[in-house]
Amino acid sequence: MIKKKIYIILPTHNRKNYLEKCLFCFRNQSYQDFFIVLVNDGSNDGSIELAQSIFSEDQLTIVNGNGNLWWGGSLNKGYHWISKNVNDLNSIVVFMNDDTILPQDYLEKVNQEIQKGKGNELIVSQIYNLENKFIDGGLYYIDWKTYMFYAEPQEGIKPNCQSSRGLCFTVESFLKIGGFHPTLLPQYLSDIEFTMRGYELGLELISSKELMVKLDDKQTGLIANKIGDKGLFSKKNFNNPIHRINFILLRCPWKFKLKNIFRVIQSIIP
C-alpha cells in the first residue's frame, strides 16, 4: 500500500498537559510519514516550546493566532496553511483535538482507510472515553423540516453531517469544501457546517470502526438554554442562539429557514 503524507491540523490553547499526551501519541506512531500543523491560539503556558522539543521542523510547524480563534478559526488557519503549502492533492488531512489519546497504529489505519475509498470520503473516527466506553460514532443527521438533531441516525436515514474529532480526508476534498466561518461559527457547529457542506458537494460521510480515539469525557462545554441563563451568548455555550441562527442561515434550505430561526428564538424565551 502506498504511504501517503498525512497532515495533522492540531489546534491548542493553553492546555499543555493535554497537548503533551497527544503529541507523544503521534511521536510513538508506527506510521511516521506525517506533519503536524499546530495551530497555537495564543498559548502562553509553554505548550509551543514543549512541541518544539518533541518534534523537529521536518514534522512540525507552528501557526499562531491571537487567542480568539476558537475551533472554527483554528481549523480555518489550518485550511489556509494546507492550501498554500501542500501541492499533492492525494495527501491526507486529519483534524485532531489536543485532548485526544491515540493507539499506536492510528495513522497507519488512517492511511489504509483513505486508500480503501475513492478519495471523496470524509471518514470520522469513533470516540471512546479513557475507560474504553463507546461515546460517539461521529455521524449525525439534521432534519431541517422539524429542526431535529439525531446523534445516531435511524436505520435507512443517511447521515448528512459529522463530528470533526479525528476527521480524515484528502487534500483535494479539503480544497473542494473550503474553509470555515470563524466569525459566524467560532466554536460549536463549525464542524457540522463544514461536513454538511461536504455532504452537499457529494462527498460520502463514513464512520470507521478501524479508527478509534479516546478522550477525557469529563470535559464539557457550557450549557445555557434560556434568556437570563448565565453564558447564553458565550462562545463556550453549545446552545448559543446567535450561532444556531448563523448555522441555519448558512446551511438550512430556504423553505425552512424562517421557521427554524423562529424555533431558535422561541426556545430561549423563558
Image: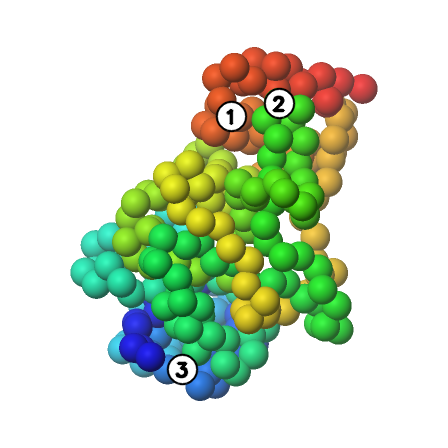
Q: Nearer the viewer, residue 250 or 114?
A: 114
Dot placed on the residue nearer the N-terminal end, 2 or 1: 2
CA–CA distance in space, label 2 to label 1: 9 Å
Query: Which of the labelled discs sits on residue 26, or is there none?
Result: none
Residue at 51 percent across and 62 percent down: it is 166
Residue 170, quarter of picture: bottom left
- Residue 79 seen in the figure: no
Residue at 60 percent across and 45 percent down: it is 140
Label 2 environment density (alpha carbons within 10 Å; few <14, some 14–19, many ≥20): few
Residue that mark 2 sits on: 145
What kind of residue is marked 3? Tyr
CA–CA distance in space, label 3 to label 1: 40 Å
Residue that mark 3 sits on: 31
What is the x, y in percent for residue 208? 54, 63
Q: Nearer the viewer, residue 77 or 115?
A: 115
Q: Which circle, 2 or 1, is nearer the viewer?
A: 2
Label 1 environment density (alpha carbons within 10 Å; few <14, some 14–19, many ≥20): many
Left or right: where does residue 212 sit relative to residue 84?
Answer: right
Residue at 34 percent across and 64 percent down: it is 92
Residue that mark 1 sits on: 252
Helix, strand or loop at label 1? It is loop
- Residue 4 seen in the figure: yes
Extreme residue toward the right, this view: 270
Helix, strand or loop at label 2? It is loop
Left or right: where does residue 65 sit relative to residue 263?
Answer: left
